[in-house]
Image (tube, rainbow, N blue to C red):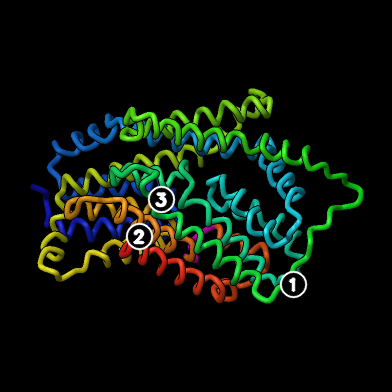
Amino acid sequence: MGFIDPSIAVVASFCFLGVMLYKRVNLGITLNATALFLALLSLEWHEIPNVIFKTTADLLTISVVLATFGIMLLSQLYKETGVINRLSESLSRIIKNSKVVLSVLPAVIGFLPVAGGALMSAPLVDSEAEKLKLEPEKKAYVNLWFRHTIFPVYPISQLLITTAALTEIAIFSIILRQIPVVIVMIAVGYIVGFWKVSNVKNRINSNVKSEPNSDLHDFFTAFSPILATIVVVICLGLVGLDLSKNGFDVLIATFVGLAVLIMISKLSLQVFAKPFKNWGIYGVALAAYGAFLLRNTMVAAGISDLLKAFVTNGSVDIVLLLTVVPGILGFLTGSPLAGVSISVSILAGIMTFSPETAALIYMSAYLGYVVAPTHLCFTFTADYFKCSLGKVYKYVVPSFLITFMTALLIYFLV
């Protein structure tokens, strides 16, 4: 039995979480501190070490934390070696249609899951968008929206890995349900971003000779670490060794991708060591651990039992819990990981997760985060293109509504 009523404990913990997020404390520290604060309020002293040990010794937790660390290392090394620049430059030479370039470039840069990463694609988008004479808010919208089309089906996305691990649903079962949503996201982004915009062919600078075979070679070479990672994840999922159950498929694939990047970039020890000096790479891994610790703490404290009575007697519709809770949390925290991990922790005791429910939780938290003013990519992009968030919302809100309705339709119909 805890020291205080579980309902009071959870309210106090969420207030603590809100203060930490408002103060912009690192998400890894925030999730772990919230889990420990909740444990102190709701568990007996002797139970707390047991929850921490259970979380730390769990194979799934270990593999997800290490995979998250590896993915962040891969993204940082992509940037430090300049391979990401080779990838985007070769792609812009291959594709001659400016609208397609603007749709693809932010998504390609989106393969790097770094906070505020839209700032990396902004200069490329700016230069290409000038050919179409797009106004600043349209440039900001295109950069923001298309960067975030890739993650719901990107098998080494930290959010997707964590969602699959917390709900105990295979990654590709979630991805399959999200493919139609991503297709709609892309279509909506293209229509809203380029409505009544005249097409202009991408003119290559006359001083720069473009050889199709060379450009393709450059692109596939630069893309090979990401491609190798995705292929290994798929192959390990097909061999039937249940590696995905403990998260080993993504862990192994991530380090294969790192090995390929090291080979193609002829990485020096000095460049390889540079990301390890950056706190961010550890903070993201700590956030993955915190997600599991918070879930296990909520289960041990019996927090989910508070909602069970409301759901079973019909007072609260389950679809509202699957959408509103993660959506609001993603919006308020500016973090889809916080939205998913807290929502799953709350719902774990009252339902058995399925691909349908896992995908709906994911998309709700993710879309809430994409349109949040606390979302770094959003604020950085608006600042870069010197336009107000309000002007960008004119395009973002209808795009959000159409995409969210698609996610709901997939949940009910498929």
- The earlier-in-sequence mark between 3 and 2 is 2
* CA–CA distance in space, label 3 to label 2: 34 Å
Q: Which residue is mark 1?
A: 198
Q: Amino acid at mark 1?
A: Ser
Asked which quadrant contains residue 265, the reply is top right
Q: Are marks 1 and 3 in contact (CB under 8 Å)?
A: no
Q: Is residue 342 visible?
A: yes
Residue found at x 18% / y 47%: 299
Q: Which residue is mark 2?
A: 18
- The earlier-in-sequence mark between 1 and 3 is 3
Q: Is residue 382 visible?
A: no
Q: Which residue is mark 3?
A: 176
Q: Tell us which disc is closer to us: 3 or 2.
A: 3
Classify 10 Å Cα crowding around label 3: few (below 14), some (14-19), many (20 and above): some
Asked which quadrant contains residue 186, the reply is bottom right
- The foreground one among 324 and 29 is 324
381 above or below 287?
below
Classify 10 Å Cα crowding around label 1: few (below 14), some (14-19), many (20 and above): few
Q: Amino acid at mark 3?
A: Leu
| Magenta span contains residue 141 | no
